[in-house]
Image (tube, rainbow, N blue to C red):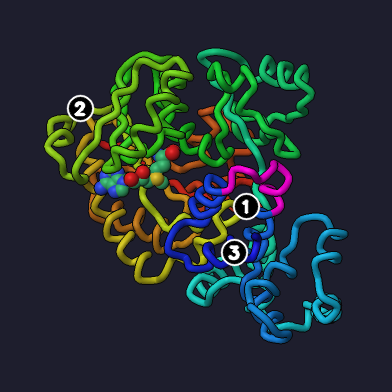
């Protein structure tokens, strides 16, 4: 079964998580443990694809079978029982290879077009810890909905349910839960006291620092991860417009709004960034968040298929979109208003380059140093999150997804 699922995922015509969930929907008889093994094995292969494909060139039979044996995340006993004796011999042979002797590409498992700019950006010393961290699973972080509870109260309630957690190191709203227990049946979740949200995403919402009674726009709201955080920061007052071109994603926001008790959110589907609905709000808004469509390469721990599905051409197209959305969103702000441009990409081309080009073309916007803004928002160790005045989060340094954000104030 794993081989069959892996074959489907490796076509790369759909995101891996969609392929996996479609597969599970079709195979309802699979138990919890089997699902876990299948998904984790497929993700392990996606993470280490270059290395595993190199190993799988030797041996015989279908390639996916050998990739499955290499990435197997279930019981070892089961694996040994499934293998033919020539496979056991082959696996033991490739597992004995000293990986430190292999070519860099087989150790970092990234395509050249991605490895090269990251190496140039970070330097050799920092690149390798990043590459290693991208091949690990991500943390499970929760954001406490301060409209309904407090961080300490949620922590105590989790403990009462037998779930340990720790306050997140930077975000004052977050709890980190080791071991990835299932949370979606807990009352804390069904009653909207918590949302699952990476600490990095929480920090983006904190950068905007939306206040009571303000007019705020979440320009690329999607399913509303950040919208919900902003709405709670506004204490359910004012007006928070949640725009997106995808009606489907906005639909997923509605039940989340209901659960979190927010009534200050106004979702609206727009046709594009220059939609008439937006023009009507020109110069009227206090704060605008542009959580731009991006390559998503900061989320490789969760979505390892992206490194094989994205391409330099796709990134180029995204850059054009990002610049256009940012320029359009900026027009909404009144003077003294705050603009935040954010991505979950690691690439300078989608981040600093877009922000610097915007600054150069918009002299009426003054860049605000991320460290200062974060400190005012009660974020701990704010200086350690700032790189050249921008927010820069790295999985290997901050144990969040990779995020970028730039902040401006309109003169
Ligand atoms: C990074 S995702 C947003 C994630 C969301 N903010 C969250 O926290 O869950 C980017 C979003 O931008 C939307 N998008 C793409 N082009 C857009 C445009 N021209 N105007 C507004 N939104 C757009 C996509 O549909 C996608 O939902």
Separation of residues labelled 1 and 2 (CA atoms)? 37 Å
Q: Which residue is mark 1?
A: 395
Residue tagged by mark 2?
284
Alpha carbon distance from label 2 to label 3: 54 Å
Q: Residue at x 40, y 71 (%)?
A: 312
Residue numbers of the magenta segment: 27-37
Question: How many residues crowd mark 3 within 10 Å: few (<14), some (14–19), many (20+)?
Answer: few
Which residue appears farthest toward the front when viewing the image? Answer: 29
37 is higher (above) or lower (below) than 261 = below
Residue nearer the viewer, 307 or 398:
307
Among numbered discs 3 and 1, the one appearing first in the sequence: 3
Q: Please tell me which residue lies in front, 239 or 57.
A: 57
Q: Quadrant of the C terminus?
A: top left
| Dot 2 or dot 3, earlier in sequence | 3
Residue at figure coordinates x 67%, y 33% from the top left = 182
Alpha-carbon span between mark 3 and mark 1: 31 Å
Q: Which residue is mark 3?
A: 4
């Amino acid at each position: 079964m794993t081989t069959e699922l892996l074959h489907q995922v490796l076509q790369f015509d759909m995101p891996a998580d969609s392929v996996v969930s479609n597969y599970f929907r079709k195979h309802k008889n699979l138990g919890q443990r089997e699902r876990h093994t299948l998904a984790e094995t497929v993700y392990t292969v996606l993470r280490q694809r270059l290395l595993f494909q190199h190993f799988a060139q030797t041996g015989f039979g279908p390639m996916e079978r050998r990739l499955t044996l290499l990435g197997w995340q279930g019981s070892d006993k089961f694996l040994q029982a499934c293998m033919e004796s020539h496979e056991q011999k082959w696996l033991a042979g490739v597992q004995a290879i000293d990986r430190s002797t292999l070519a860099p590409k087989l150790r970092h498992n990234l395509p050249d077009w991605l490895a090269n700019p990251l190496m140039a950006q970070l330097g050799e010393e920092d690149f390798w810890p990043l590459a290693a961290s991208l091949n690990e699973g991500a943390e499970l972080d929760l954001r406490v909905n301060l409209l309904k509870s407090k961080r300490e109260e949620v922590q105590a309630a989790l403990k009462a349910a037998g779930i340990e957690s720790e306050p997140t190191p930077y975000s004052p709203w977050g709890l980190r839960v080791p071991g990835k227990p299932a949370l979606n049946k807990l009352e804390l979740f069904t009653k909207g006291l918590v949302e699952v949200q990476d600490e990095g995403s929480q920090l983006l919402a904190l950068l905007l620092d939306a206040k009571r009674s303000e007019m705020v726009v979440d320009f690329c709201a999607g399913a509303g991860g950040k919208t919900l955080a902003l709405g709670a920061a506004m204490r359910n007052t004012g007006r928070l417009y949640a725009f997106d071109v995808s009606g489907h994603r906005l639909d997923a926001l509605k039940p989340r709004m209901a659960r979190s008790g927010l009534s200050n959110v106004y979702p609206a589907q727009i046709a594009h960034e220059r939609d008439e609905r937006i023009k009507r709000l020109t110069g009227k808004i206090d704060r605008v968040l542009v959580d731009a469509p991006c390559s998503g390469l900061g989320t490789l721990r969760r979505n390892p298929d992206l490194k094989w599905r994205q391409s330099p051409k796709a990134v180029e197209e995204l850059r054009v979109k990002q610049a256009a959305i940012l320029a359009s969103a900026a027009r909404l702000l009144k003077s003294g208003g705050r603009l935040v441009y954010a991505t979950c990409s690691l690439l300078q081309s989608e981040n600093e380059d877009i922000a610097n080009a915007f600054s150069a073309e918009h002299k009426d916007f003054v860049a605000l140093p991320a460290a200062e803004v974060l400190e005012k928002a009660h974020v701990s160790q704010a200086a350690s999150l700032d790189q050249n005045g921008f927010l820069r989060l790295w999985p290997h340094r901050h144990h969040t997804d990779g995020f970028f954000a730039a902040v401006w104030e309109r003169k």
